[in-house]
Amino acid sequence: MTAPFKNYFSAGSDAYRTFRPGYPPELFSWLAGLAPRREAALDCGCGTGQASVALAEHFAKVYAADPSAAQIENALPHPRVEYRVAPAEATGLPDRCVDLVIAAQALHWFDFDRFYPEVMRVAREGAVFAAFTYGLLTIDGEIDRVIGRFYHDTIGPCWPPERAHVDAGYRTIPFPFPEIEAPAFAMTAEWEPAHLLGYLETWSAVKEYRRIVGSDPLALVADELSAAWGDPTRVRRVSWPLVLRVGTIHPEHRP
């Protein structure tokens, strides 16, 4: 039985594109170097295309699939990226057509029993699969404590169960491919407090809190965050732990 699509991100897709952090370019250079060819790549659960566009710097063609039409409508345009409204488990692509498949901050939403056979179907001989995720951000001690209480206590009950995979660094997700050890990549940004609040706005648990409680949880934390941050024009460095699971797809993995 097909699981229903959990549409947490269609509302506010423009905010998702504006406020979500970007991945380091070195990550995509490294992944492209692992691929047997650079003819085509696939970004599953692409959202508004941050990773898709980064891949297009290294591949002649990038297919980018997301089940949310709103996310695709707000996706970053690029001449080598072909966006499509499609779930990761049924991309509609031909057999054996891509050299790299990625899932950027998306694997935890997928139906693993259906997704991995789709990866094996579309992947060419020796293609690479990579899933990456980032957890709770860090800025400095006091700000981190405020955000930590907000994350765990205020909106904690509103996180979907899939979020536990992110908190576990994807180690709770099945991975059917021989793994490749990945180097450490730094994921950072330079933000003012207004950008931080915009980022928190994109959290699925914030939206779920509003739906259940009927009020805005950000109003409960805004003053405390402001006091911890200080000067509202001050730019601070924001960091995220970036976790990768990478493997090579061999013929014996095919369905």
Image (cartoon, helix red, strand yellow):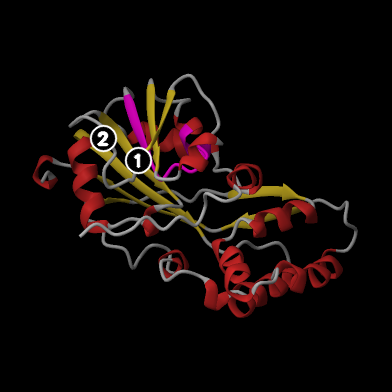
Q: Nearer the viewer, residue 21 or 73?
A: 73
Q: Is residue 186 left or right of residue 96?
A: right
Determine whether 151 is above or below 40 in the image. Answer: below
Element assignment for label 2 = loop
- Quadrant of res 197: bottom right
Q: Position of residue 225 (x, y in %)?
A: 79, 68
Find out whether the residues at labels 2 and 1 contact each other: C-beta distance under 8 Å: yes
* 43 falls in the magenta region: yes
Q: Nearer the viewer, residue 172 or 152?
A: 152
For the point 12% across and 43% down, the residue is 254
* 98 falls in the magenta region: no
For the point 18% across and 48% down, the residue is 117
Residue on which disc 2 sits? 92
For the point 72% across and 73% down, the residue is 146
Residue on which disc 1 sits? 86
Q: How many marks?
A: 2
| Residue at the limit of the structure toward the bottom, as seen here | 153
Q: Amino acid at mark 2?
A: Gly
Q: Amino acid at mark 1?
A: Ala
Q: Is residue 53 left or right of residue 214?
A: left
Residue stretch rendered in magenta on the structure: 40-52
> How crowded is the residue under tag 2: few (<14 C-alpha within 10 Å), some, or many (20+)?
some
Q: Is residue 157 left or right of residue 177?
A: right
First in residue order: circle 2 vs circle 1: 1
Q: Give the Cα distance between marks 2 and 1.
A: 7 Å
The N terminus is located in which quarter?
A: bottom left
Q: Position of residue 39 (x, y in %)?
A: 31, 22
> How crowded is the residue under tag 1: few (<14 C-alpha within 10 Å), some, or many (20+)?
some
For the point 83% across and 64% down, the residue is 229
Q: Position of residue 73 (x, y in %)?
A: 52, 35
Element assignment for label 1 = loop
